[in-house]
Amino acid sequence: MYIHIDLEAEEPIYTQLKNQIIAGVARKDLLLGESLPSVRSMASDLGINLHTVNKAYQQLKQEGFILIHRQRGVVINPEGIPQANDEYRKNLQKSLHPLIAEAVCRGVKEEEFNKMVKAIYEELNHIKEDHE
Amino acid sequence: MYIHIDLEAEEPIYTQLKNQIIAGVARKDLLLGESLPSVRSMASDLGINLHTVNKAYQQLKQEGFILIHRQRGVVINPEGIPQANDEYRKNLQKSLHPLIAEAVCRGVKEEEFNKMVKAIYEELNHIKEDHE
DNA sequence: CGCTTGTTATATATATAGTATAACAGATGT
DNA sequence: ACATCTGTTATACTATATATATAACAAGCG
């Protein structure tokens, strides 16, 4: 899977990496059980430090997206990603609230907001060609 | 308007303050043209430093939520908040994307997501009692 | 004039982000 | 057995962001 890091962005590198892996899982560009590159080779590929990759991997592991076997490496959780629970929903609501508050101030109605959400859902559901 | 700061939260204080003011505008708890406390009195009220308040105010000014007159103080933009434009929509989409990607991974369908959005829109539209 | 306003300038402390090396420990391949 | 790959841990360093503490400046108002 192609991953692009913007070193100039204000978003931390490990966050960019995390989000792109999560997006890869969401759009099934990364399948359950699929391997990810080792911290060293991923770091080398992206031109960043291995600790930065490790930080992203550790958080993805903590959140249930990946499993890390001592020497077999890193794989997308073959059991699937832990489904939404109350704590997750609470946090999602907390993240969504300020975005919607500003949207309301700027005149974005619920229908338009829903259209943006729909567009993102559809983008993530696009069928990908099997390449390679 | 009541503002509550959590000093232990990972979210920066100036961000908490910004978001609560924006939410106040969204739910019309703060009206256009209404005054905000001076940086010093707001800082004193919240038990934080005046520079932290100033940072929040500067960003709110930059984003068009408030006007700052040299000595008359700080007011919610009487002309109204600048309406959504292409740049704002692009940024909103950028903020929304990772949230939805994770939601997809965790089995949150578009309908449930829309329900959460709807709940927040409704919370912001609740009519407030006029208290003083 | 004296007060309050926002503003600017330093200085300091702490935390986070990122990099650079180095070393350790477990599993694999030859 | 041995070298090699894996994740992991430790240390050190730089840079930036967050937050505080003082102090001073400049403009308007009563």
Image: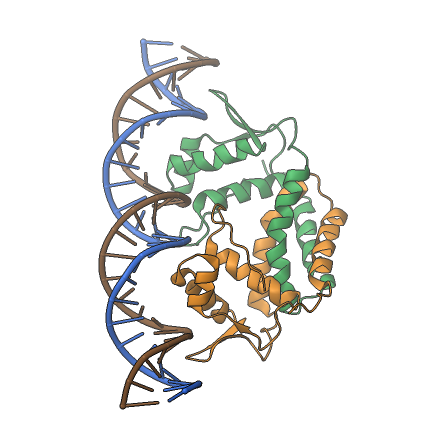
Chain colours: A orange, B green, C blue, D brown
Q: How many marks?
A: 0
The N terminus of chain A - image quarter: bottom right
Asked which quadrant contains residue A122, the reply is bottom right
Foreground pick, B20 / A74:
A74
* Picture coordinates of residue B83, whole percent (x, y): 68, 35
* Picture coordinates of residue A45, whole percent (x, y): 48, 61
Q: Is residue A71 left or right of residue C12?
A: right
Q: Is residue A55 left or right of residue B81?
A: left
Q: Is residue A3 visible?
A: yes
Q: Is residue A36 left or right of residue C27?
A: right
* Picture coordinates of residue D7, whole percent (x, y): 41, 73
The C terminus of chain A - image quarter: bottom right
Q: Is residue D9 left or right of residue A98?
A: left
Residue pictured at 62% horizontal, 43% vertical: A102
Residue pictured at 56% horizontal, 64% vertical: A21
* Picture coordinates of residue B56, whole percent (x, y): 48, 37
Residue pictured at 47% horizontal, 49% vertical: A7
B28 shown above or below A29: above
Residue pictured at 61% horizontal, 62% vertical: A23
Q: Is residue B129 visible?
A: no
